[in-house]
Amino acid sequence: MLPYVCRTSVLRSARHVQHRAFRASRLLREDICPPSNITNEASNLVGNQEHHAFIYLDNVYPLRMNSLDFRQYIFMKGKASLENLASRCIPEQTLPHNFRVLDVMQRSKDGGAIVKFAFDSGSGEKEQVALDIAARVNSYLQQKTTRAGFNFQPVRSFLVKGQPFLEDIVRRYPSQRLRVEFQGNPVSVEQLYSHFREYGRIYDISIYPNPMTGKDPARYAVVQYTRMRFATSARNCLHGHVIQDTRLNILYEPQLHTNVVKDWVMNHPRISIPVAAALAAGITYAIFDPVREFCVTSKITRRFNPNEYTFYQWLRRETWSRLLPHTREEGNLWAEDPKQLQQFKSWFRETPETFVVVHGPSGSGKSELVKAALAERKNKLVINCEQLVNARNKADRTKQLAKQVGYFPVFTWVASLGHLMDTLIAATTGGQAGAGFSATPESQNRDILELVAVALADVMPMERAEHRRRVLARQSWYIRLQRRLASMLGEGKQDDDALDAEDDPDFDAKADIPVIFIDDYMRDATKNTELWDDLASWASLVVRNGLAHVVFVSANAGVSKQLAKVLPGRSFNSINLLDAPEEVALEFLSRHLNDEEITDELRDIVQALGGRLTELESLVQKLKLNMTPRAAFDDIVQRNVIEIRKYGFGEMVDDEEYDLDWSLVQFWEIVKLLTQTDVINYDDLKWSDYFEGKDKPIRAMEHAELINILHCDGRPDGIRPGKPVYYTVFKRLLEDKVFAASMEIESATGMKKIMDDKLAKLQQQVIDLSQTYGGKPPKEIDTRIRYLLGKIKALQTKVDGYEKTIKDNKALIVKFWDKKKGT
């Protein structure tokens, strides 16, 4: 241990002995540990000789903490400036023993510099002289403080007792912890403290391995200082120092930083994970939701649509339209119908209170009619359910919905991340998965629709503000100045209210109400039921709050029942589009073809096609390709024949999971009946032997758009083909003798099997009744037996007819085959 003396004793000590004081200790100590690195140039001379030693100056440079620490480049000193600093810190002229500075070596990473000096003394007193010189330099720095410019802290000096390790290893940076390796016998804690305490306050000293707990001797110690500069000074001064034949090798020990917050978060996942999820949701709400609301509002108001700006319209009209001939857009049967368009406009001028429902068979022009009614509407939003249903997966459906409504940015990966969070919670906490952190695609769709509702609520205030701005722009500067002064004085509120109440003919509040157009709603009613429910619930929310008009277009007959669940007690504004009459269909053709091309043959073809838009458009396209009307008609019919055989009879379908909800016998019976009459009696068909009172197959055929069910007084009344062209298609199927014979064989075989099953049951009943009372049944049972025998006779007659049908059609197929081979 170093000798300690009281403060009064130190003040009375020798003049050339300098003591260092530390605020944390009430004791002062005297540095009497001799250095082990003093060398001399001529060791064979007697008397005073020249000896060399080192002084370490601390706080010359900023400490380099990592590779990104740029302070070194700002406060870098050159050789001249470093020597000037050494001359200011060391009074070379006043030091005894012929003191002279030989060299100054920078230690920029450690924040200091090593000064090599020479002095004259005898060999026996060189250590004491070096200590005396270091004490005088330290006393000089205390009296004449030299402060660094980067931290305004004083420069300190220490005598280097070891052999400094002048290294420039890139990955080694200063630390508060020093690893002191023993090259020799272990050094005790007391000895380490006596040598290391000189450079600063020590936080802890640990020896490894601990000799108190093991048999192995200590190999190194870890000295931790309270400040990093204390550690850098000790390393530069004591590295290579020898204590009782043990050399000290000192390295920086990386500081093991323990993050209390991180440890608490990792150790409490049941609390930290919900808090993290709440923070993420809050950040998303604060940052992304305003952006998304702006994008949706821009989509509704068409803020960035160039067609809405007068300059673009004029530029297109004067450039592009002049270069290319004007082509009229392909209209539909109802686009120029003034009655239907006026009906839509009258509904749109009302306050939103109910839905507008447009239904009818596919291809009847429902969507085109609504688009024509919305052509001059500014604020509108279109949701195409066909694209949503045809999406590859649920994530792609969410992207499609977001794209249609202008929702940006959208993160579909949040759903996968939510499932991962549930898995982590279940694995780490043992909690139940699905505890509310997972965001499913369905919940994302609902969030998108909710934000669209919020954006719709902002549309009308924006339109009123825009109207106010236009009114103010038309006023003179004097009136605007008066309003500005009145608003500054707090008297402008009544003026603003009066401004809103002004009767401006250019402002129509009803015309600015947004319109939501949901196209092809319930395209596949049996699937995606959650999507239909979400859209209907959201639409009812929009209508109940008067935010927008909502128009549903659907080919499904049950759309009204679905919408009545979310908006009960209110009648809908409905339009039912059926096939257009022949006059309207001919007018449609005349708009696309020359009048002279409307021949009698074309009139007959239009009568066969009916007023279905898809078939008429296909006919027009084929006629424009220079096909004859008869060839175009035959091509359309043949295409529909293939569709009927594929989807009606299940032919040419490779998907094993594809299963019809009706039997081929049932559909073939409907095909035969529709070739004999235009409309089938619904109840007569339902209670026939082919359906036996079950109407589920009939509903399935209607859903597949093979037939249409006509209603009378709210009940099913009749059945007709799904398209007018199906009358011709069904006749073509019957004209195909081989196909018709095959279907008759299959139909008769199926019905014969049903009758055989009924016969077997009746025969068993007759046998059971006949064996009662020992083979002598009473009169009442005998009457029942006779009734059953009558039914057996009727069924047997049908079975005989089915067998004859099977035999005749088989012969017909063989006849056609032989005839084909003969030709």
Image: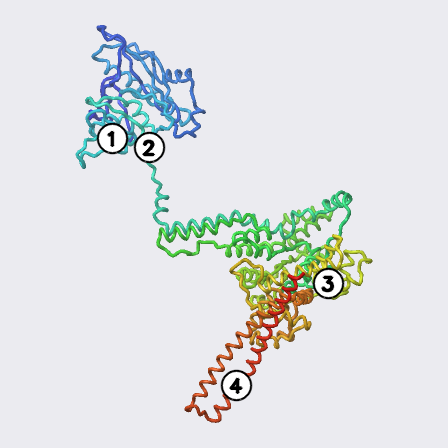
Q: Secondary structure at mark 4?
A: helix
Q: Badge 3 is on which residue?
A: 342
Q: Badge 4 is on which residue?
A: 789
Q: Amino acid at mark 3?
A: Gln
Say if residue 338 shows up in the picture: no
Nearer the observer, 125 or 662: 662
Nearer the observer, 801 or 351: 801
Q: Marks 1/4: CA distance? A: 113 Å
Nearer the observer, 60 or 789: 789
Q: Amino acid at mark 4?
A: Leu
Q: Badge 2 is on which residue?
A: 254
Q: Marks 3/2: CA distance? A: 82 Å
| Marked residue nearer the N-terminal end (1 or 4) | 1
State which mark lies toward you, 3 or 1: 3
Number of marks: 4
Q: Secondary structure at mark 2?
A: loop
| Marked residue nearer the N-terminal end (4 or 3) | 3
Q: Marks 4/2: CA distance? A: 105 Å
Residue 295 screen position, x and y as percent: 59, 49
Say if residue 683 shows up in the picture: yes
* Label 1 close to label 4 by CB (< 8 Å): no
